[in-house]
Amino acid sequence: MKTNFILLCLVSALLLSYAPTAMPLTCDPYQLSSCAGPIFSGSQPSATCCNSLKKEQPCFCQFLSNPNLSPYINSENGRTVAAYCKVSIPSC
């Protein structure tokens, strides 16, 4: 009985050591290229744009700290696109 318990503990420890870890967050502003048209023109964003915004939302603070990107994200059209897609823009 004691041997089975020790064996179970060893197997559990081995399985836990091989547990997958979370993938690192990779922020890629080019993934938002499908939103360029709506941000520049004020047109309705596509489902592709909304999906990209949702996927990249954890990266918004990083994007906002980039002086080349923040004017587009903070623009009236950028905020309208985000609101349409039900994605909030954080205040970082």
Image (cartoon, rainbow, N blue to C red):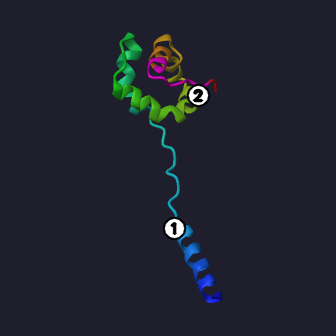
**Residue 76 sits inside the magenta stretch:** no
Kindly identify which numbered label has been placed on residue 18: 1
The residue wearing badge 2 is 65
Residue at position x 51%, y 32% in the image: 57
User: Which of the 4 quarters of the picture holds residue 48?
Assistant: top left
Per the image, label 2 sits on a secondary structure element best described as loop
**Distance in Å between CA atoms under marks 1 and 2:** 36 Å
Residue at position x 40%, y 31% in the image: 51
- Tell which of 75 and 8 is nearer to you: 8
**Residue 84 sits inside the magenta stretch:** yes
Q: Which residues are magenta?
A: 82-90
Find residue 82 and report its horizontal and vertical position in percent: 48, 20
Marks 1 and 2: which is nearer the front?
Answer: 1
User: Which of the 4 quarters of the picture holds residue 47?
Assistant: top left
Find residue 53 and report its horizontal and vertical position in percent: 45, 29
Per the image, label 1 sits on a secondary structure element best described as loop
User: Would residue 4 be found to the left or right of residue 27 on screen?
Assistant: right
Quadrant in the picture for the N terminus: bottom right
Kindly identify which numbered label has been placed on residue 64: none
**19 above or below 29?**
below
User: Which of the 4 quarters of the picture holds residue 49?
Assistant: top left
- Tell which of 13 and 65 is nearer to you: 13
Question: Could you tell me the amino acid type at mark 2?
Answer: Ser
User: Would residue 54 be found to the left or right of residue 17 on screen?
Assistant: left
Label 2 neighbourhood size at 10 Å, few (<14), some (14-19), many (20+)?
Answer: few
- Tell which of 17 and 10 is nearer to you: 10
Residue at position x 58%, y 79% in the image: 8
